[in-house]
Amino acid sequence: MAPQYGRSGPSRPHIDIIDPDLYERGGIPHDQFAWLRDNDPVHWHADPSETVPGFWAVTRHADVVEVSRRADLFSSAARGAMFTETEPEDLALYRMMILYMDPPDHTQRRSMVNRGFTPRMIKQLEGHVRDISHQLIDAVAAKGEADFVEDIAAPLPAYVICELLGAPVEDREQVYHWADKMIAFDDPELAGSRDVGRQTAAEIFAYAGELAARRRADPCDDIASKLLQPDSSGYALSDEEFALFVLILLVAGTETTRNASSGGMLTFFQHPGQWERLKADRSLLRTAPDEIVRWSSPLNLFRRTVTADTELGGKQLKQGDKVVVFYPSANRDERAIDDPFTFDIARDPNPHIGFGGGGPHFCLGTHLARLELSVLFEAIMDRMPDIRLAAEPRRLRSNFINGIKEMRVEFPASTPR
């Protein structure tokens, strides 16, 4: 069902789509997004920071795609890709990270990192993803209850990243807890403060340095070894560049699957007919992951900076303006997606932009995320097909990540495999 605001709703809601408390209390503010898409799709929004006067909130699918694809006009490097303002000394360091680059630097780095995400590399992870999914279910099977987030959705992508990096199995728990801290910097229950995030980043850097030393001495068939070896032009990542890659991989590589898994499971609880449909037709595992990502939109936003005076959505944007794209809004835009307020696991084609709006920063791990979601939900259907919600989920306090931090579930107890 579409929200009350939209073409048929004349009244204007209070617009504040950046308050992290809003997302913790009620999830994605679809009422506000619908009104903005119909009435003010490129909206000048007050900024809680005192360092900038405000930002342009971009809410329509076509405009989000335009911003995503025009790196020449909407820069990730100028002021960074995150919503909050970055200190100049931090920005200089972060610009070594692919997320904070523009072409041509981004193009060169992306082509190098792509070596670790080829179809062959992802395909050879399928068995590991399946084994990890069943191991996580084994750990809770006899209890008949679990926290779906902590016990299943969150550890899965962190453990898979260990496989990607060639990290030892015994490091899985540490990597998981680092990822948990990094994505929760706005939730005091999980992170406490930005200082905790900085400390966590320092620990990841130190770990990446040790991993780089091991992989240089003993290369393996994993992404760490490939990135530390020279490419066709003779370029290889430095230790600092490799550490920044590991940092972004931990954040970007965990958040999509973690929050799509938990958000997808919650959506199936809310749409039980679709769960029964999936159980009856496993071929829908091909299309279900994209619909789960569209519906849950694990990433809420990214920021860009205008590089030259331009026009977008009928508004005149000035050089230096802050622009923020909102993926959940674009993913419910009826101008681009038919019947967007219906959850349909057979939706095909599915022009969602839950993995980004195209362009240079399209999600590098898209195929891996689809694989993880497909394998995990297949394992759940095999092992706990009668899973049900046991308590009201608790959402993450964040305007960056649309996530659930606790979701208690119940299922008939069974013996581990």
Image (cartoon, helix red, strand yellow):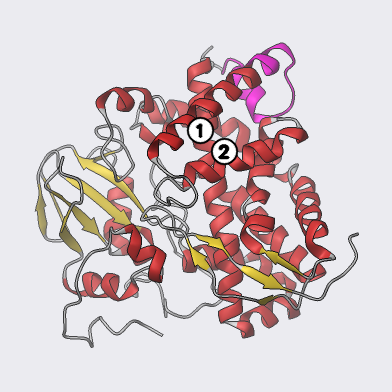
Q: CA distance from mark 1 to mark 2?
A: 6 Å
Mark number displayed over residue 200: 1
User: In the rendered structure, which amino acid carries the disc numbered 1?
Assistant: Thr
The image position of residue 139, as x and y in percent, is 80, 56
Residue 171 placement: quadrant: top right
For label 1, the crowd category at 10 Å Cα-Cα, with few meaning under 14, some 14 to 19 and many 20 or more, is many
Question: Which residues make up the magenta segment?
Answer: 213-231
Mark number displayed over residue 178: 2
Q: Does 223 lie within the magenta span?
A: yes
The image position of residue 277, as x and y in percent, is 68, 81
Residue in view at x 89 percent, y 60 percent: 416
Residue 64 placement: quadrant: bottom left
The image position of residue 387, as x and y in percent, is 72, 75
User: In the rendered structure, which amino acid carries the disc numbered 2?
Assistant: Trp
Q: Please, which residue is most extreme toward the bottom here?
A: 8
Q: Does 365 lie within the magenta span?
A: no
Report the front residue among 304 and 410.
410
Quarter of the picture holding the C terminus: bottom right
**287 lies left or right of 73:** right
Mark number displayed over residue 62: none
Q: Is residue 121 visible?
A: no
**135 lies left or right of 175:** right
Residue in view at x 33 percent, y 40 percent: 81
Instruction: Specify which label sits upstream in the sequence, 1 or 2.
Output: 2
For label 2, the crowd category at 10 Å Cα-Cα, with few meaning under 14, some 14 to 19 and many 20 or more, is some
Residue in view at x 29 percent, y 59 percent: 19
Quarter of the picture holding the N terminus: bottom left
Disc 1 and disc 2 in contact, CB within 8 angstroms: yes
Residue in view at x 71 percent, y 11 percent: 217
**88 lies left or right of 126:** left
Which secondary structure lies at badge 1? helix
